[in-house]
Image (tube, rainbow, N blue to C red):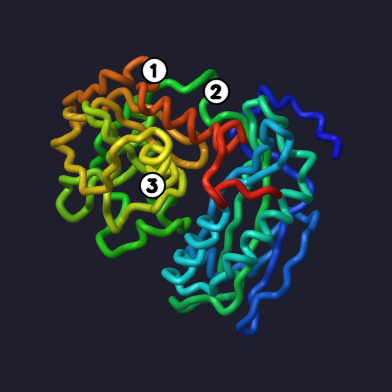
Amino acid sequence: MEKKNIDWANLGFGYIHTDYRFVSNFKDGAWDEGVLTEDANVVISECAGVLQYAQTIFEGMKAYTTADGRIVTFRPDLNGERMEQSARRLEMPVFPKDKFVEAVRKTIRANEAYVPPYGSGATLYVRPYMFGSSPVIGVKPADQYQFRVFTTPVGPYFKGGVKPLTIRVSDFDRAAPNGTGHIKAGLNYAMSLHAIVDAHNQGFDENMYLDAGTRTKVEETGGANFLFVTRDGKVVTPKSGSILPSITRRSLMQVAKEYLGLETEEREVYAEELPEFAECGLCGTAAVISPVGKVVDHGREICFASGMTEMGPVTKKLYETLTGIQMGTIKAPEGWVVEV
């Protein structure tokens, strides 16, 4: 299929309308088969559950053109599993993982002309999401739901190359103990908007949220998991029931252990430990790993020497290995790269 006439090298990270999206509706206790449609508009009641009580969940993933010209996506089964978990937590009907993966593949195939070419630095971002569509005025789950998948070509998350971030320890709480921090619900991100705008106004790139219970342990940012590297090369990631289980983070930890031969550990990470780490990064779908050069804790600066001016050596190797797996230049573990 001939590619669209797009300046791939200069794409930003934003929405561009593509030709097709997948839509499936849940009514009378069952999902319909779903269809691909050219209509990008969503028409719902003014009293829809999503509008009244924020009953909505979503996923984020990408499609790539590999070095040998195949179009693939990365570990879509894990996105499907996470969406199932999110649905159960918000009392929404589960859209089965196998149907989720097939819907994603159908949508990418239908928009093949928008998948950027290999080496362009761009990818096709894929957004599956679900919301309560029927009228709800009392506080309760909706009766009807819609599941959709749309795509948009995007450039690198950080234009001009990856530069180390400066983040602050936030006075805001991201998620309550036993709350919804472990699922990918729209309401979690809405709660983080004021904090991130405030951080930007204060000159910071992001927030470091601590646990709401004790405010002593590192959790995550508004949209990414933390990953630390000790001075002796161990890769450490925070463990908490309030952290979103990032697919990128889980993949990086496996890459660290099985590809790079590094020791890995998932455990509680205390804020007082931060000065002891050599490297710090934020990991997620959009940028894979974003290096952190400095954390500011109420005026006290904690600098990571290995990442003040560029990505630290271990972080860089993790980034290069995972992106190599995604782009087909490094052999992937079984099931990680799914051809569309």
User: Does the rendering let one see residue 15?
Assistant: yes
Q: Earlier in the sequence, mark 2 or mark 3?
A: 2
Of badges 2 and 3, nearer the viewer stands 2
Of badges 3 and 1, nearer the viewer stands 1
**Residue 223: x percent and y percent?**
42, 44
What kind of residue is marked 3? Ser
**What residue is pinned by disc 2?**
159
**Residue 303: x percent and y percent?**
24, 22
Residue at coordinates 77% horizontally, 43% vertically from top-left? 112
User: Does the rendering let one see residue 194?
Assistant: no
Q: Secondary structure at mark 2?
A: loop
- The answer to whether 207 appears left or right of 213 in the picture is right
**What residue is pinned by disc 3?**
192
**What residue is pinned by disc 1?**
310
* Residue situated in front as seen by the camera: 328 or 244: 328
Query: From this viewpoint, which residue is outermost toward the right?
Result: 2
Q: Residue 28 lies in what quarter of the image?
A: bottom right
Query: From this viewpoint, which residue is outermost toward the top?
Result: 309
Residue at coordinates 72% horizontally, 53% vertically from top-left? 107
**Residue 75: x percent and y percent?**
55, 51
- The answer to whether 332 appears left or right of 146 in the picture is left
